Image (tube, rainbow, N blue to C red):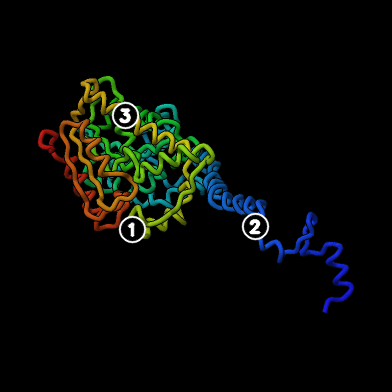
Amino acid sequence: MVTENEKAHHLVGGPFLFAAGGKSAIQRKKRPYITDWFIGLLFLFYIYYLFPMLLADMDQSDRHYLRQQLTPLQFARPQSFTQNGSELTEYFQRYGFDELAQRLDARYFVGPVELGAHICVAHCWLVGREPPATPRPTVLLAHGLFDHAGLFLKLVEALVKHGFNVFLPELPGHGLSDGDPVHITDFGEYGSVISSSLLLLNQNPLFGPVSLVGQSTGGAAILRFLLDQAYPVTVHKVVLLAPLVRASHWNMIRVGMATIGMLLPRVPRRFNELNSHDTAFCDFLANDDPLQNRSLPITWVRAMINWVDWFKRQALLLKQGRQRLQKAPLLIIQGTDDKTVDWKYNIPQITQFFSDTSFTRVIDARHHLVNEDKLWREQVFTGLINFLKQPANRSS
């Protein structure tokens, strides 16, 4: 039974009424309003786009601060692990730089250096506690998208133990290097980092013959550099690990960019185990690595599309005799369970530019070969190091 007070409450507009129309919540459920859909879409936009963007940008000041704590890159005095501020000490410990320095018979150097148009943080390991009489062969190592030097220490250790110096610059927008997180407008910026790094190494007597090794986007950076040179460059060998020309689901990416790409500043990143069988590594990326970006700028996707178009133009120039074949021996190592790059398309597109090529399939390996589980990672490292150790005229 409804009392008079309750009737009066409903008549004047209680908590279940709308000011316009005076319809109750029960009546409202019969027909969704446009405003409800609009609010729902705003909420979803926040959860899937804005929130990851906020997470991605939170550590920018920390990256800048850590970079300022490092002295400019030089090769006179190895990096100390005992005379740093607490933040830099925590950085070295989180990724294991300090422990690696104890295990290796090598000198470790790190610091900001101008590479191309950017101030990049470069990490370097020189074999031996003292300079050897003869410069050691050197690997210029290029990491992949979202990566940084701290994720490549397993490969660094393997290379140094087999007698290779390693120079590892962090690409713009990655690690402690400058630039907005993962932001790039043209892959030529990555190529210029490789170019400047190679020039630095070739001009320094501490470094022997330089080979280029790149994982995924790092492979694209190396290709962008090599194919853009007007004259032959001095490179001993090239190793590409799951190299990026075009990504998986390529047609979907192009359609998406043509339809909604102009509306979204970033694409949210979803962490999963599709990149590696090493669940500990995947969990570290998702939960414990503060240098991981939580979203991908649309500008990067647009740059990737432009990169694919540029690569196709180089292939056309090659057929016309206006692009030079690369003489450095090439090894491509590719996992067959890679869901990140369109590797069946990419491999023949890359090998056409090289006169001396080798291709190794790693059965069931996923995309991040440098951080695959031990079973697959050891196959990758063994194949890579054996290839680098072969005399160039015996590589095939």
Between the C-alphas of marks 1 and 3, the distance is 31 Å
Q: Could you say whether the residue bearing mark 2 is in a helix, strand or loop?
A: loop
Q: Amino acid at mark 1?
A: Asp
**Residue 279 vs residue 4, the one in the foreground:** 4
Direction from residue 204 to residue 44 in the image, left or right: right
- Tag of residue 225: 3
Q: Nearer the viewer, residue 335 or 42?
A: 42
Q: Could you say whether the residue bearing mark 1 is in a helix, strand or loop?
A: loop
Mark 1 neighbour density, 10 Å: few (under 14) some (14–19) many (20 or more): some
Q: Position of residue 295 (x, y in %)?
A: 48, 46
Answer yes or no: is residue 229 visible.
yes
In this picture, residue 100 sits left or right of residue 85 = left
> Percent x, y for residue 196?
35, 27
Query: Is residue 90 in sight in this rendering?
Result: no
Label 3 is placed on what type of residue?
Phe
Residue at image coords 29%, 36%: 140
For marks 2 and 1, give the one nearer the viewer.
2
The residue positioned farthest toward the left in the image shown:
394
Q: Residue at x 29, y 41 (%)?
A: 243
CA–CA distance in space, label 3 to label 2: 55 Å
Q: Earlier in the sequence, mark 2 or mark 1?
A: 2
Report the residue at 42% width, 44% height from top. Answer: 146
